[in-house]
Every structure is written in C-alpha cells, then in structure tokens.
Image: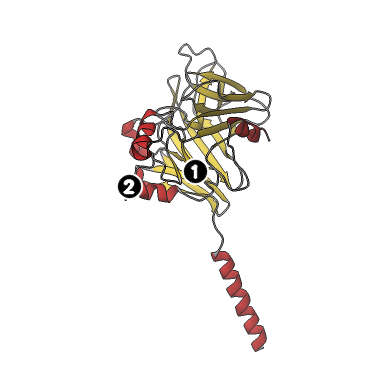
C-alpha cells in the first residue's frame, strides 16, 4: 500500500512539474495601460489593434506590427519598457521593435472594404474597436474577437465582428469577418485584407488564383522610427519587414492608394475568412529564417 501511495505521489509531482515547464508560444491580452490596445503574438511576430481610449487620436481598425528577433514572447516586456522604463519600443534594443506606421489605414493585414462603381473610389477602413472578448487561450493557441459598431462604408454604418486566431508554428493569423447592417446600394461589395505600403511597389509578390498578396519593405521606412534608431545606435538599417495577406482559393489583388489588397465579393451577414501575418529579416529560430525578400515570398507560397 505504501509503495502504491508513493507511486501516485511521484506521478502527481511529475505531472505538476511537466505542467509548470510548458512554455507558451502564443500570447495575447487587453492592454488598458496603453489606451486599450489589444495585443497578441506567436513565434513570428507581434501585433496590436486599437481600442476606445485611443479614439480621440483617430485610429483605424488596422493592424500594427511589432518585429521580433526570435520566437521569445515580447509583448509584455515591450509595454513595460515603454510605459514603465520610458524606453520607446520604436528602438531596437536587441529583441525587436515597433517601426511599422499604421495611421488611419488597414496597416499590416487589417480589413479593407470596397464597392463597385464608387464615385469616390475609396478603400474603406474603420476606427477603434468597441468591445473585445477572449474566446480561447492556451500555450499554443489564442483566439479573440473584436467588435466595431460604426464602420462607415459609402455613408452607411455597418457593424464589424472580427475573430482572430493565432497559433504556434503558423506564420499567418486567421481572421473571420462578419459585416452586418443595411447597405442600400446596388454595387457589389468587396471585402478582404490589406497591407499599407511605405516603400517601393517593386517589392511585391502576388498570385490571384491562390489569393496571395505579399510585400517586403525597409523596416525603417518610417522616418520617425529611422531617426530614433539612428540617435540610439547610429544605424540607419534594421533589415526588412515582411508582410502577407492570403485569401485561400483566389482573390482579386491590386494596389491602390498605397495599399496592397486581396478581396472577394461579399454579401452582408456572410463570414469571410482570410489570413495575414508578418516577419523580419533579422528573425531566426535556429531552424528557419527569411534573410531575403524572396525567402519570405517562397515561404508564403508553401
């Protein structure tokens, strides 16, 4: 009996130790200390989307990108460094940096909406989210939903619900989008993901029939980030930023108003699924890296 009891105790102790040593590869959270950001990451990159407290600054429903040097989780340390230590996350201290400018655009894979025969020929993006909800959180998977009550498309207010899934080992996030409301307009609506371009349109790979829109740019294409890094370390180079949007099984892909987009015809109430993600030329997990633009484009096609 004592032997059995000892075995059970040892087994429980071993199980507890195993649970304690599980290292998360995916992470995300609501960030009230930074004006209601919602941030998340997996091994390849970190991202954030903008919340209600930032609304006076006219944010978009686009996606911001943080470059990572390794699979190490960095979201909490970046916020701590910025807001507690006063060391801007726009500077690379060795772990990565925030150097991708979003402004009022779709950013690094955010939602874009277009309509046929639009006299303004616009790419519509929304503002800050209104509500957030975490749907699933494990060491290997993070799923959350953001809801937007006032997406203005051609003067009509729509509701946007976007559920984003980040998984360990996957370069791209999954986005499931539902738009609802009334759109008394006969033109066809097109919905998908877009990438704000800050550099040359020559650094693009597209494939309409497979729905891939990929892009590479100088990581310091934003002048403010470039100046901050130069003042800190005297360097004007921080490698290349890589981005991609994919709508499986084909999409209409084009560049307009400095946005590379992949879209499909859409009916209100339907669910549109697309994928988006990013990485950095300076990123490596000792098994996989993307030292050139072509390496990134090749990886996205797999």
| Foreground: disc 2 or disc 1 | 1
Nearest the camera: 257 or 263?
Answer: 257
Q: Quadrant of residue 92?
A: top left
Q: What x and y, as percent, mark residue 185?
A: 51, 17
Nearest the camera: 60 or 10?
Answer: 10
Mark 1 residue crowding within 10 angstroms, few (<14) / some (14–19) / many (20+): many
In this rendering, the answer to whether 87 lies above or below 15 is: above
Name the residue beneath numbered marker 1.
68
Q: Residue at x 67, y 32 (%)?
A: 301
Q: What x and y, as percent, mark residue 53?
A: 33, 39
Mark 2 residue crowding within 10 angstroms, few (<14) / some (14–19) / many (20+): some
Name the residue beneath numbered marker 2.
83
Nearest the camera: 265 or 58?
Answer: 58
Q: Residue at x 42, y 20 (%)?
A: 155
In this rendering, the answer to whether 178 lies above or below 139 is: above
Nearest the camera: 58 or 196?
Answer: 196
Q: Residue at x 40, y 47 (%)?
A: 78
Question: Which SS class for mark 2?
Answer: helix
In this rendering, the answer to whether 191 lies above or below 42 is: above
Q: Residue at x 39, y 40 (%)?
A: 91
Instruction: For marks 2 and 1, give the CA distance.
Output: 19 Å
């Amino acid at each position: 009996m004592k032997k059995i009891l000892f075995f059970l105790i040892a087994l429980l102790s071993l199980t507890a130790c195993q649970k304690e040593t599980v290292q998360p590869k995916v992470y995300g959270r609501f960030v009230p200390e930074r004006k209601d950001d919602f941030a998340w990451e997996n091994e390849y990159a970190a991202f954030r989307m903008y919340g209600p407290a930032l609304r006076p600054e006219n944010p978009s429903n686009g996606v911001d990108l943080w470059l990572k040097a390794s699979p190490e989780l960095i979201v909490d340390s970046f916020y701590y460094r910025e807001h507690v230590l006063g060391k801007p996350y726009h500077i690379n201290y060795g772990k990565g940096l925030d150097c991708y400018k979003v402004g009022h655009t779709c950013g690094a894979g955010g939602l874009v909406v277009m309509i046929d025969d639009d006299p303004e020929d616009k790419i519509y993006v929304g503002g800050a989210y209104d509500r957030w909800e975490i749907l699933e959180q494990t060491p290997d998977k993070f799923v959350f939903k953001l809801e937007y009550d006032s997406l203005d498309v051609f003067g009509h207010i729509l509701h946007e619900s976007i559920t984003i899934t980040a998984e360990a080992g996957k370069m791209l996030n999954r986005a499931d989008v539902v738009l609802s409301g009334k759109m008394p307009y006969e033109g066809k609506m097109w919905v998908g993901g877009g990438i704000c371009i800050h550099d040359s349109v020559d650094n693009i790979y597209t494939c309409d029939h497979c729905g891939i829109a990929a892009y590479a740019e100088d990581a310091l294409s934003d002048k403010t980030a470039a100046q901050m890094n130069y003042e800190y370390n005297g360097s004007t180079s921080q490698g290349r930023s890589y981005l991609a949007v994919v709508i499986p099984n084909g999409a209409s892909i084009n560049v307009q108003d400095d946005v590379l987009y992949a879209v499909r015809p859409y009916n209100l109430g339907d669910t549109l699924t697309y994928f988006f993600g990013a990485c950095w030329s300076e990123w490596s997990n000792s098994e996989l890296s993307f030292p050139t633009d072509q390496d990134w484009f090749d990886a996205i096609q797999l």
